[in-house]
Image (cartoon, rainbow, N blue to C red):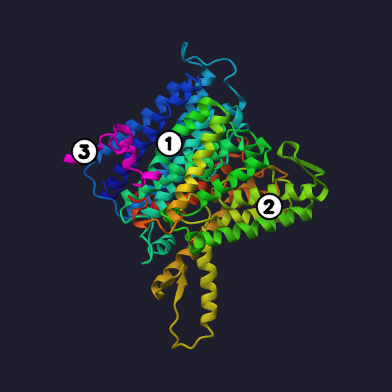
Amino acid sequence: MNDGYRVVLRDLGRMLQVLAAILAASLPIPVVWGEFYAVPALVASALFPLAVGTYLKRRYAGADDPGKLHGMMIAASGWFQVAVFGTLPFLLVSWTVAVDPFPWPLSVPAGAGSETLAAFRDPLNGFFESMSGFTGTGLTMTDDEGALPATVQWWRTLTEWVGGVGVIVLTTAILARPGSGSLTLYESEARSEKIHPSIVSTVRTIWWIFLLFTFLSITILWLAGMPPWDAINHGMTGLSTGGFSVTDASIGEYDSPLVDFAMIPIMLLGSIAFPVHYLMLRGDIRNLYTDLQTRWLFGYLALGSVALIGLLLLDGTYQTEQVVLADGDLVLNGFGATLFQTVRYGLFQFVSAGTCTGFGTTGVSDWSAASQLTMSFAMVVGAAAGSTVGGIKLVRLATLVKGTAFRIRDVFYPDSAVRYFEMNGRRLSETEASREFEEAAIIAFLWVVFLGVGLAVLLLTAPTGVTLENAVFEITSAQGNVGLSAGITGPGMATPAKVVFLFNMWIGRLEIIPVLVLLRAVFKRGGMYA
Amino acid sequence: MTDDDSETDWMPRNLPVVGRALAFGPGDPLYDVLLIAGPLVVLILALAGRNVVTVALAAGYVVGFVAVLAYHVSPADDRDGGPDR
């Protein structure tokens, strides 16, 4: 066997062992909630990847250390295989409830089953949910998340939380390469390289920051009025900008402005690059405005929110006669009430889209085309590289905008003029600048191409009544790993559309290129093109 | 192990489980406390429900984080002594 495959398979084995450990660590959840029937399903879900992972790790124990090419292939194939094995809890719990194979105390109590859980008996639906979770997307095959067993709710949350940590590690430590944006931003002489020079210590640092923010998020949401279980799940999926909920109507279920506004800083935390978080926690708070991506993030979220709120106001989407706040102490009437509701929903939805979280406080399928496309733009751009978000990332948007302006201004200078391209206060050489432009342009191009492919398949398979803006919204949500829905995604979706969405979520998480590298390696080395 | 270990046995960093957790932590005593207290706070909120004490505890945790951040931001703080690993 090719040496490269040995390296990849050995590391895939390690990843499966970690997945098994995560599943095993989830065993207290069904016990605490009295869902004992889910225990065998979880145990089996953990044992299977453990067996396969241990076999692969031992079989290829002597493989070399991974190089950069292996890193890409391990990331792409690893995300895919983790999503495949992560399907097991959905599949096994739903079939356990359907068949009820065990005697007391593992028998299924009356009322445990639901139509929404039954959807996971179809492996494709379970795989969709798992891929959506691990990629931090949040599009779901369930019709009513609140009716799911707590074990399944927890597994959905955990997939997003683990996927969130995974993508930070991926972009700041493993796939950070010249031209990938995050390297340019965090490798400059004035800053610490990435978070730390070594991958192991980088991962450790990411973990403690992520854990600390998780506890903080849960506490804030609980203080805002969420029940503990809801606060735990939404704190985890909000910080990881995943967007899975434990309620049918997402954050809109609480119908509480306080909860809405409490969620906004949590989504923002997840969308700021973690190297910047690290510097700020060390006391270098200036990064809030000196870091290019963070500065652009606040600027673009503010401008986008104002634009969306303006559009919603013009459309009269939230005409409201009266809003009662603070237990009746504050009452808004007429335009004040309309303005408050429009700001509340517009701000939340734009931040949710721009940070690629995907929580909803209101339906968007009946919004005007302009409003939906404004949201779609936010979902394509995403937020900061080095955070948990999807999209093409702000650093690439900044590179394209500044690079285009640089090239145009270049025409007006004499040939002998020496000019430097500056990014984030750092002067780039001609080679570095070209590499940055090239990477940003390639990613943006591939992004549009795959959006087009997904859109075509969706339009061909969607039921009548789905508008173009609905379809654009849905596919950008999938590829941007956002999770907001115009009502198209669900168990009744056509199989080709589900498959295309799975692919879009996968490439969106890995920023396309590692997946293309993997596919090329599989086809070429596998003999198909040899 | 060093000769000084006996004098610091009581420190959280030397406790079996907590010490291992802290080995992955920020390496800053204030953030260490927040990190270790986090799961305990969440557990207490879940078990004890919403009352004056738990609301004060949760608010204290959030305020504590803001205070630690402010402490590190303050010019008097030696940044080299901040969280690191």
Which callout, 3 or 2, points to the residue nearer the camera?
3
Residue A302, image x and y in percent? Answer: 63, 58
CA gap between label 3 and label 2 equals: 62 Å
Q: Amino acid at mark 3?
A: Asp
Q: What segment is highlighted magenta in the picture?
A: B3-31
The amino acid pointed to by label 1 is Ala
**Residue A472 drawn at (x, y percent):** 64, 52
Which residue does the numbered mark 2 point to in the structure image? A372
- Image height check: is A247 above or below A5? above
Q: Chain under label 2? A: A
Q: What chain does badge 1 belong to?
A: B
Mark 1 sits on what residue?
Answer: B37
- Residue at numbered disc 3: B5
Give the percent coordinates (x, y) of residue A137: 54, 44
For mark 3, give the secondary structure.
Answer: helix
Q: State yes or no: discs 1 and 3 in contact (Cβ < 8 Å).
A: no
Magenta stretch: helix, strand or loop mostly: helix
Q: Residue furthest left?
A: B3
Give me the residue at 39% from left, 45% from top.
B30
